[in-house]
Image (cartoon, rainbow, N blue to C red):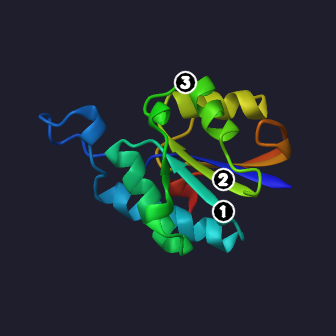
């Protein structure tokens, strides 16, 4: 069975008003939450075969910090520009392009699109806080699947 792990970027830094939204970095809490979330996923036996991210700095940095915890080479993270402030169909498009051989896909994106997409997949309204992971167990192929079950991990609920 395949897994789709949807991750909203970690907490970003709003302190530099001159920066464009695309270039906003993580704040110190975000820099701590991303590796913590990755360690929680590793503890559950969930590691990526493939990581795809929005190219925005806060999403890509979240992906890189998590990749290091997984032993996943950060240079292998695929950037998919439509994930930057994308809507659910943009996120679905990223999933459609996933290699059929990948069993676990990690997708890093932004609200509101990622929460809407997760909600549409699981059939209930989800509001994903920063650095939240929604782990979907899926049946079928990346281009045509259904969610058999899911779990949502929130950074504030994690130990340490």
Residue placed under numbered mark 3 in the picture? 87
Q: Is residue 36 visible?
A: yes
Q: Position of residue 5 (x, y in %)?
A: 65, 50
- Residue with the mark numbered 2: 105
Whether the residues at callouts 2 and 1 have beta carbons within 8 Å, the answer is: yes
List x then y, in percent, for residue 62. 42, 55
Of callouts 3 and 2, the N-terminal one: 3
Residue at mark 1:
49
Of the pair 130 and 51, the residue shown nearer to us: 51
Is 14 drawn above or below residue 113 in the view shown?
A: below
Q: Is residue 93 left or right of residue 20?
A: right
Q: Is residue 11 visible?
A: no
Judge left or right: residue 154 versus residue 149: left
SS assignment at label 1: loop
At x 80%, y 53%, the residue is: 2
Disc number lying in front (3 or 1): 1
**Element under label 2?**
strand
Residue 159 placement (x, y as % from top left): 55, 68
Contact, mark 3 vs mark 2 (Cβ under 8 Å): no
Q: Which circle's residue, 2 or 1, is located before the other in the chain?
A: 1
Asked whether the residues under the numbered discs 3 and 1 touch, taking CB atoms below 8 Å apart as contact, a structural biologist would say no
Q: CA distance from mark 2 to mark 1?
A: 6 Å
> Could you tell me which residue is drawn at 56 percent across and 55 percent down?
51
Q: CA distance from mark 3 to mark 1?
A: 24 Å
Taking the image as shown, residue 90 lies to the left or right of residue 44, namely left
Left or right position of 87 against 16: right
Label 1 crowding class (10 Å Cα cut-off): few <14, some 14-19, many 20+? some
Q: Earlier in the sequence, mark 3 or mark 1?
A: 1
Name of the residue lying farthest toward the left: 18
């Amino acid at each position: 069975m395949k897994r789709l792990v949807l991750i909203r970027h970690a907490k970003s830094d709003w302190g530099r008003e001159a920066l464009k939204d695309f270039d906003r970095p993580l704040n110190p809490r975000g820099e701590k939450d991303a590796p913590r979330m990755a360690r929680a996923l590793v503890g559950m036996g969930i590691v990526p075969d493939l990581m795809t991210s929005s190219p925005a700095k806060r999403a890509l940095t979240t992906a890189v910090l998590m990749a290091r915890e997984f032993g996943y080479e950060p240079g292998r993270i695929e950037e998919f520009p439509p994930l930057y402030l994308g809507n659910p169909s943009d996120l679905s498009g990223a999933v459609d392009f996933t290699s059929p051989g990948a069993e676990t896909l990690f997708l890093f994106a932004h609200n509101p699109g990622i929460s809407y997409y997760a909600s549409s997949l699981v059939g209930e309204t989800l509001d994903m806080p920063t650095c939240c992971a929604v782990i979907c167990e899926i049946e079928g192929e990346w281009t045509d699947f259904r969610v058999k079950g899911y779990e949502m991990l929130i950074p504030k609920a994690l130990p340490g």
